[in-house]
Amino acid sequence: MSPDPDAVLARVREIALALPEAAERLSHGSPGFHIGAKGKFFAYFWHDHHGDGETAVHVKTSGLDEQAMLIEADPDTYYRPPYLGPSGWVAIRLDADEVDWVRVADRLAYSWELVAPKRLLEMGGR
């Protein structure tokens, strides 16, 4: 669990809200990031959710195959989150001694692309 979840959330927030039309609102008590006023969510920040001891950002993948590949390739970074995991989302641990923020930014941007409306993608996306 991150010793300073506010600092970690601030970093996630900075990355997520830099994406076109990204916005933030609470969802089930956790910060969630979505596109537009009522658009789809592309990320959630969880810290010690239901006492699980994890600090992570949950992002969309292209599906269960990609999710499984990420977890198998780097189980110290990725895991299948509760609730969202069966839909292909993956969690990225943010409580490690060193977080690869470039990787986190790439996964957030990819997740954004998966839910972005066609008009944003046609405009050049991110």
Image (tube, rainbow, N blue to C red):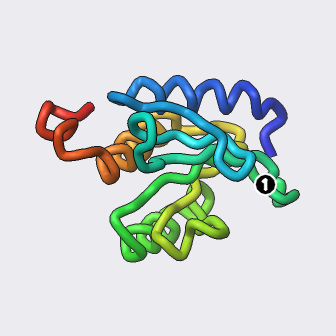
Expressed as whole percent of the image width and height from the top left, the position of residue 6 reads: 75, 28
As drawn, 73 above or below 105: below
Q: Residue furthest left?
A: 122
The image quarter in which residue 83 lies: bottom right
Viewer-nearest residue: 83 or 90: 83
Expressed as whole percent of the image width and height from the top left, the position of residue 72 reads: 49, 71
Viewer-nearest residue: 68 or 46: 46
Relative placement, left or right, of 16 versus 30 is left
Q: In which quarter of the image is the C terminus?
A: top left
Residue at image point 74% right, 47% down? 29
Expressed as whole percent of the image width and height from the top left, the position of residue 22 reads: 42, 32
As drawn, 22 above or below 117: above
Residue at image point 87% right, 57% down? 51
Q: What residue type is labelled 1?
A: His
As drawn, 108 above or below 85: above
Q: Residue furthest front?
A: 38
Residue at image point 70% right, 45% down? 30
As drawn, 77 above or below 5: below
Q: Name the residue under label 1.
A: 49
Which secondary structure lies at badge 1? helix
Q: How many marks?
A: 1
Q: Residue furthest right?
A: 51
Residue at image point 36% right, 29% down? 21
Estimate how packed mark 1 is, as few (under 14), some (14 to 19) or many (20 or more) residues with alpha carbons within 10 Å.
some
Expressed as whole percent of the image width and height from the top left, the position of residue 46 reads: 70, 48
The image quarter in which residue 77 lies: bottom right
Relative placement, left or right, of 19 versus 55 is left
